[in-house]
Image (tube, grey):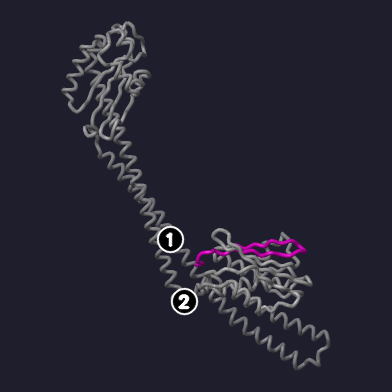
Amino acid sequence: MIKFLENLRQQTFGRLIVLLTVFSVAIALGLILIMSSFVRDRAVHQLARDDALQTSKLVFQSLYSAMRKGWNKQEITEIIGRLNENFPDLKINVYRGEIVAHQFGEMAGERVVINGDPALKQALANGESAMLFPNKDNIRYLYPVVAKQECLVCHTQSHVGAVHGVIDITYPIQTLKVSFSEVTNTIVIYTLVVMVVIFTILYLQLRYLRALLREIKGANEELKNFAYVVSHDLKAPLRAISSLADWISTDYADKFDSEGKEQMRLLINRVHRMDGLINGILLYSRVGRVKETIAAVDIDRLVHDVIHSLLPPGNISITVAGTLPMVMTEPTRIQQVFQNLISNAIKYMDKPNGKISISCVAEGKFWKFSVADNGPGIRQQHFEKIFQLFQTLAPRDRIESTGVGLALVKKIVEMYGGEIWVESVVGEGSTFVFTLPRTHIS
């Protein structure tokens, strides 16, 4: 059995490593794709913008002679024609501003084109260049020409800062002289950096998991040894003391006075309490370490069996509201939960007509169980303390208790992914509430 559990832990750790590796590689690939796409687009756009700007300046220099003559219609038309012949892949146009058109005359269809093109109209209005992508295959660059002081010699109706026109260049992306070596190198560098970071994190995680696994194995071995010591080395002399005390009490009963008999009774009670405490510690240490086969447990039948085994006194009535559900869990563990809660309600009952009720409702993905009683109740400041190991509220000489029961219940419930808490009013009673998943409990 121990070997099987060890193999199971190793398989689980192996699956965890595989999942972490796959997850890390997926993140790395995703980041690479995102960054490569971003870097590529950014580089292409930036290089395209620079190339378009240089081309526009060349066009501007070619048009300069015409502009010195005042953007004459005939001169500009001839130069644009020659440029389009020399650059067959490019589509070059020049659109003049209103001041220039008013002084030197309108060109056929010029105003119609401007008014029908919002980007062109905006460039003529604000004098700001624009890079446009009308479709996936072409880039359009609008380069405004703004008047300077020297331009006013010819443009007598203009002023400094006025937009005299816009050079409009459209050309296919594949004609751009873009060096993709820079893009490729950048992507490779980003990829290497990301992979180094990812695998460094993964390596550190694996080292941490290995160290954690070693600690867990060591703790399990210590716990196993502790359980062995408790069950053999401590209980053996305790049984001897119990047998000797029973023998003395029986054979020398006539020799003891009332005080001696009381002392022997206290001795035997202390031995029984110690035995119960050791048993409680053993049960607590086994939770989560010793696994049972998961099975469909009929909680309704289990609770009735627990009630029958506890033999509640005649002045205490125990009722079960409705039919309790079926839960996939470990039978012994869930029995310990109800046995401790119901036995505590019986043990601490201080009313002549005690009432205990067990119920369950479905709340989302959980079953919500309740064990309520009309006993003495618990002060609010003790709500957390009662779930701690070896903690009791009543003196042990008055009510025998190991202080392990509720701590055991809390550990079992939380191991299943549930919660437990108490709601109580002093003098009116207490309700212990806990939740269990409605799905399969692993």
Q: Nearer the viewer, residue 172 or 226?
A: 172
Q: Nearer the viewer, residue 162 or 123?
A: 123
Comparing labels 1 and 2, the label whose residue is closer to the camera: 2
Lower sequence index among marks 1 and 2: 2
The residue tagged 2 is 2
Q: Where is residue 252 drawn, in percent x and y?
A: 77, 92
Residue at point 31% right, 33% down? 45
As drawn, the label of residue 207 is 1
Kindly state the secondary structure of the residue where label 1 is placed: helix
Q: Please, what is the three-letter code of the amino acid marked with disc 2?
A: Ile
Amino acid under label 1? Arg
Magenta stretch: includes residue 407? no
Magenta segment, which residues? 419-442
Horizontal side of residue 298 vs 113, given as left or right: right
The answer to which image quadrant residue 365 occupies is: bottom right
User: Which element is circle 2 on?
Assistant: helix
